[in-house]
């Protein structure tokens, strides 16, 4: 890793300059021989897109191009499109810090070699810096999970690897700054590589400002530029680890929470900013897996915390999964009963009962099906493997252990039995009674009696069949018949059961997929629904808010309007109080002039509003006219342009003075009227806004409840389906296993079947039932 | 905070270009060192913008549909798609499809610095989606109405997304009445993230200094420019920050209006993936 210096400092001096755009670079790179100085690049070939020339991979701050040098080495060339401050010094520090890492001490070779070229590319007639990095062969995290999500062990291993990378970074006081799926690549051997070091923090950058805040779907909403430091990755590290653990625990979560076009794993920005409306959190926090739940709870708890306050992601912080620590578990709890009680013949019997076995005919059946002979021990093995109670007889098949030893006789009469008895008795007696009380036509009695007897027999038959003893005996016989049929051709039955199991699995998978999709679409539905409510709310409140904002100006206007007449009256009053005689103090204003004025009707300053002038006929002199309040223009003898101007000025200054002393606020009642009118309007607009907001909140709550309820229903249905499928599957597997030892078993089942039939006829026959109806025994 | 919605394939953005194709667009204007017809300047701008958007949204597997793009021409008796070639007649097209289907790729000669202080003539590939067309009047009001219906459908389908951006490229001489009310109506559509953004690029022969993102109409050379300025939306705060980082002087009232200058840089204003950050 090296940073080439030389040439003039292009960046880092604080002044911003216009950087080329991605398309500018793509155009420049059409001619590597002109735009590069570096020999590898100058003679290299730039990877092309199908249509648009040099192929870019763009982010918000840069476009990356692929250049293959003549020696075959492929490089990623990062060209910056935004002037991120002091790129050069930053990369120098990062290069030094990463170069100083001891590769042997790292969990895996995650750092990628790079070179910072100050004069990297010539574009728009100027040199711009580039970062030249060896091309990393790898799959980005998102694509990798898409491909491997069903491989639980691989996903779990990746979670561990990621944890180790996070530990490496923390141990060296380094933080990547933008941990996200695009910057984490999985190499062919499953180890991780980190790329894009633009936002990286190394200890030498302490105190320097951040250039970016990372990907929105990976960062705490509370992260700010001030968090630039060794702890800034913690939220994203926990988040990515949690996502991997979730997928490893339950691959269905990926289908439920990840959108195939989404730029996130299973949680995104909205889940951090508005966890209350999130559908993802309830799924994670309520997940049946304890370890997943615990980690989800931790990360959920980080949402309100400052980034710097978060703990580092460490192995110790995560409780170890049960499956990876089998030995410890054995120590803690006594050995499972299966292992202890299975007995001699089956040392290799599966440890966990109900574990799905292979799809092909199991090994124990090979050579046994249809050959007869040593079938009994095999049956015993299967029995032990299927988890029968310790010590159960090796010769007894599971169906037998489950069946009643003998058919139980009738016991305990119920209302239904009494009803059957009553119906039978009444029915039998009814025709006779009717014949006695009424007068039926001839030949009625024999016919009716026959029908009545039939009805009574039916009542008794029905009553008998509805007895629990009878039902259970019939179930038993049915089960034995099924077994007998199965045992006729065990291989065929095995195949059929196999198909049934497959069909069951397929159906379950299909149903799960459909409900997963629905859960995912619920998220979109919720997001869009909430947005629509907001749009509607904004539309409703927009007018009210605008008017509200105009209220102060409106109030002022009303005050001015109310004041105007008061001011006018005040001025009028003052002018009226000033007699024209006072004008005598003005220069060149004698008693004669004043008299002429009063003669013309101008006694006070209020009697005229101004003067105007007109060109007099003949003379070059202008004649002065006084404008009276009536609007009339009058000439006052002896007053020419000069005196008129003086008088107009006098009046003007009087008015000015009066205006100053005029009231600044309207009279009390007027003012309070205005104030109350404004207050009413304000309250009205407030009310409109509040009402709209209240309605919006109701709509939001209703939507959220509907979506949450449906999510809840889907999740619990999914769980029920899981339990049900598991039960059916176990049943089918059990029947499959029972096929072992077919020959002996067949004879035994046939014997048992006939015994059961006889027994049922004898113990639960019609005669017995009649006796039971009568005696209760 | 408005104008902060994520732009992604699950929350795509919408870009509508309105291109004046009237007869007056055949008038020449000075652009850089040479004189070009306004229509040519505008079609070059559109083709560059589409290239820019495509590169901006390019990832390893190709150009992602972060945006859906329409190019609507308006001129003689016609308001409708101005795409040529495979996309002809289509309104909003996902960006990946746009990137893969230019009408043709031209080879243009260009003088570029040779790195040793001189200039050298080279040919560069230039994708073309639309050619300059000039004919008849300027039905700008109708064009804004056309955009209005596209936008209305878009916000209905994407209520939580980044609001549509409409960029009108014109010489401003509307012949079907004052476009102001059509512009106001267009900009009144909104998603939860904010109202539609209407920007204008004014190409004019009136001369005067080129203006980029002004905050007042003072100093604009003619009434057309002032009208278009008034129609333009105020730049959202993070876009202001980017404009500032590109060396423009911006304030609270800076509008998305450009007079006789380059507007391709507007693509850089769009945040994809990362949060809209206030740059410095």
Image: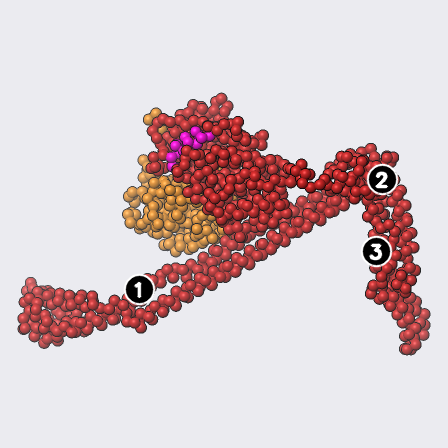
Chain colours: A red, B orange
SS for dot 1: helix
What residue span does the magenta drawing correspond to? A83-99
Residue A454 location (% of width, % of height): 90, 64
Q: Are marks 2 and 1 in contact (CB under 8 Å)?
A: no
Residue located 85% across and 41% down the image: A395
Among the two numbered marks 2 and 1 on one chain, the one whose residue lies closer to the N terminus: 1
Give residue A534's mark: none
Disc 3: host chain: A
The answer to whether the residue labelled 1 contacts the one labelled 3, judged by CB atoms less than 8 Å apart, is no
In the depicted structure, whether residue A590 falls above or below residue A146: below
In the displayed structure image, the side of residue A377 where residue B88 appears, left or right? left
The vertical placement of B144 against A421, above or below, is: above
Question: Mark 2 sits on what residue?
Answer: A742
Which residue does the numbered mark 3 point to in the structure image?
A471
Q: Disc 2 sits on a residue from what chain?
A: A
Asked if residue A95 is among those painted magenta in the image, a careful observer would answer yes
Real-space Cα distance between discs 2 and 1?
102 Å
Q: Which residue is mark 1?
A: A556
B12 and B93: which one is in front?
A: B12
Distance in Å between CA atoms under marks 1 and 3:
92 Å
């Amino acid at each position: 890793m090296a940073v080439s210096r030389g040439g003039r400092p292009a960046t880092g001096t604080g002044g911003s300059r216009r950087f080329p755009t991605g398309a500018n670079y793509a155009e420049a790179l059409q001619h590597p021989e002109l735009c590069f100085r570096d020999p590898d690049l100058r003679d290299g070939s730039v990877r092309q897109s199908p249509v648009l020339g040099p192929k870019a991979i763009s982010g918000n701050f840069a476009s990356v191009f692929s250049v293959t040098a003549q020696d075959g080495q492929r490089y990623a060339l990062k060209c910056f499109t935004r002037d991120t401050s002091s790129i050069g010094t930053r990369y120098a520090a990062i290069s030094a810090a990463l170069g100083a890492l001891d590769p042997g001490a790292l969990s895996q070779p995650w750092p990628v070699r790079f070179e910072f070229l100050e004069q990297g590319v010539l574009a728009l007639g100027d040199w711009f810096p580039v970062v030249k990095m060896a091309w990393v062969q790898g799959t980005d995290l998102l694509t990798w999970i898409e491909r491997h999500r069903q491989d639980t062990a691989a996903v779990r291993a990746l979670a561990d690897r990621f944890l180790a990378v996070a530990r490496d970074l923390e141990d060296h006081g380094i933080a990547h700054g933008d941990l996200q799926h695009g910057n984490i690549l999985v190499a062919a051997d499953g180890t991780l590589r980190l790329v894009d070091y633009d936002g990286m923090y190394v200890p030498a950058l302490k105190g320097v400002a951040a250039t970016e805040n990372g990907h929105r779907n990976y960062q705490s909403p509370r992260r700010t530029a001030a968090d630039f430091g060794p702890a800034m990755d913690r939220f994203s590290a926990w988040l990515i680890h949690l996502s991997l653990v979730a997928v490893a625990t339950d691959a269905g979560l990926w289908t439920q929470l990840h959108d195939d076009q989404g730029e996130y794993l299973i949680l995104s920005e909205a889940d951090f900013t508005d966890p209350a409306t999130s559908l993802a959190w309830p799924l994670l926090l309520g997940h049946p897996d304890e370890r997943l739940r615990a980690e989800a709870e931790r990360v959920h708890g980080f949402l309100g915390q400052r980034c710097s306050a978060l703990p580092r992601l460490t192995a110790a912080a995560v409780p170890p999964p049960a499956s990876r620590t089998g030995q410890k578990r054995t120590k803690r709890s006594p050995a499972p009963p299966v292992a202890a009680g299975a007995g001699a013949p089956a040392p290799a019997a599966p440890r966990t009962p109900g574990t799905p076995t292979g799809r092909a005919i199991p090994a124990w059946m090979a050579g046994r099906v249809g050959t007869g002979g040593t079938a009994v021990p095999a049956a015993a093995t299967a029995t032990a493997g299927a988890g029968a109670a310790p010590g159960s007889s090796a010769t007894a098949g599971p169906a037998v252990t489950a069946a009643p030893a003998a058919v139980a006789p009738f016991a305990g009469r119920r209302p239904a039995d009494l009803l059957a008895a009553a119906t039978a008795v009444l029915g039998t007696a009814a025709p006779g009674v009717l014949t006695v009380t009424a007068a039926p036509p001839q030949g009625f009695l024999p016919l009716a009696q026959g029908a009545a007897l039939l009805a009574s027999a039916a009542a008794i038959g029905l009553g008998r069949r509805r007895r629990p003893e009878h039902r259970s005996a019939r179930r038993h016989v049915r089960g034995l018949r099924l077994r007998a049929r199965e045992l006729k051709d065990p291989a065929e039955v095995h195949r059929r059961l196999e198909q049934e199991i497959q069909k069951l699995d397929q159906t379950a998978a299909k149903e799960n997929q459909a409900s997963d999709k629905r859960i995912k679409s619920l998220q979109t539905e919720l997001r869009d629904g909430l947005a629509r409510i907001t749009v509607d709310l904004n539309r409703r409140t927009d007018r009210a808010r605008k008017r509200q904002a105009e209220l102060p100006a409106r109030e002022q206007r009303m005050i001015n309007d109310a004041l105007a007449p008061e001011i006018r009256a005040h001025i009028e009053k003052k002018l009226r109080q000033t007699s024209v005689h006072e004008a005598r103090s003005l220069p060149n204003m004698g008693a004669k002039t004043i008299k002429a004025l009063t003669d013309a009707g101008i006694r006070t300053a209020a009697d005229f509003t101004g003067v105007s002038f007109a060109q007099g006929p003949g003379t070059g002199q202008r004649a002065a006219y006084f404008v009276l309040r009536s609007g009339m223009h009058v000439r006052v003898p002896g007053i020419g342009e000069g005196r008129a101007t003086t008088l107009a000025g006098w009046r003007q200054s009087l008015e000015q003075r009066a205006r100053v002393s005029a009231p600044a606020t309207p009279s009390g009642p007027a003012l309070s009227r205005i104030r109350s009118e404004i207050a009413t309007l304000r309250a009205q607009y407030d009310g409109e806004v509040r009402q709209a907001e209240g309605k919006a909140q109701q709509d939001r709550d209703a939507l959220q409840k509907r979506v949450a309820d449906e999510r809840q229903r889907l999740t619990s249905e999914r769980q029920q389906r899981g339990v049900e499928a598991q039960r059916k599957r176990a049943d089918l597997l059990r029947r499959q296993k029972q096929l072992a030892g077919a020959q002996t078993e067949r004879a035994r089942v046939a014997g048992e079947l006939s015994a059961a039939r006889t027994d049922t006829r004898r113990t639960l026959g019609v005669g017995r039932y009649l006796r039971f109806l009568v005696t209760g025994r | 905070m408005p104008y902060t919605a994520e732009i992604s394939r699950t929350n795509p953005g919408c870009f509508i270009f309105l291109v004046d194709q009237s007869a007056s667009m055949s008038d020449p204007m000075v652009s850089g060192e040479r004189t070009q017809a306004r229509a040519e300047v505008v079609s070059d701008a559109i083709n560059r913008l589409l290239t820019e958007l495509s590169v901006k949204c390019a990832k390893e597997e190709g150009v992602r549909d972060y945006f859906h793009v329409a190019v609507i021409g308006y001129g003689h008796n016609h308001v409708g798609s101005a795409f040529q070639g495979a996309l002809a007649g289509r309104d909003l097209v996902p960006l990946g499809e746009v990137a893969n289907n230019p009408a043709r790729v031209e080879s243009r000669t260009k003088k570029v610095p040779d790195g040793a202080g001189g200039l050298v003539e080279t040919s560069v590939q230039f994708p073309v989606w639309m050619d300059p067309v000039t004919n008849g009047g300027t039905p700008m009001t109708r064009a804004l109405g056309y955009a209005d219906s596209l936008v209305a459908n878009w916000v209905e389908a994407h209520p939580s997304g980044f609001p549509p951006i409409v960029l009108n490229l014109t010489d401003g001489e509307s012949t079907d009445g004052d476009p102001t009310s059509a512009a106001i109506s267009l900009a009144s559509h909104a998603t939860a993230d904010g109202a539609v953004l209407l920007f204008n690029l004014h190409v004019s022969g009136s001369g005067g200094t080129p203006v980029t993102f002004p905050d007042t109409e003072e100093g604009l050379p003619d009434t057309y420019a002032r009208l278009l300025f008034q129609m333009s939306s105020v730049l959202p705060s993070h876009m202001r920050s980017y404009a500032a980082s590109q060396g423009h002087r911006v304030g609270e009232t800076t509008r998305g209006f450009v007079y006789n200058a380059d507007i391709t840089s507007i693509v850089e204003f769009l945040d994809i993936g990362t949060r809209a950050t206030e740059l410095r």
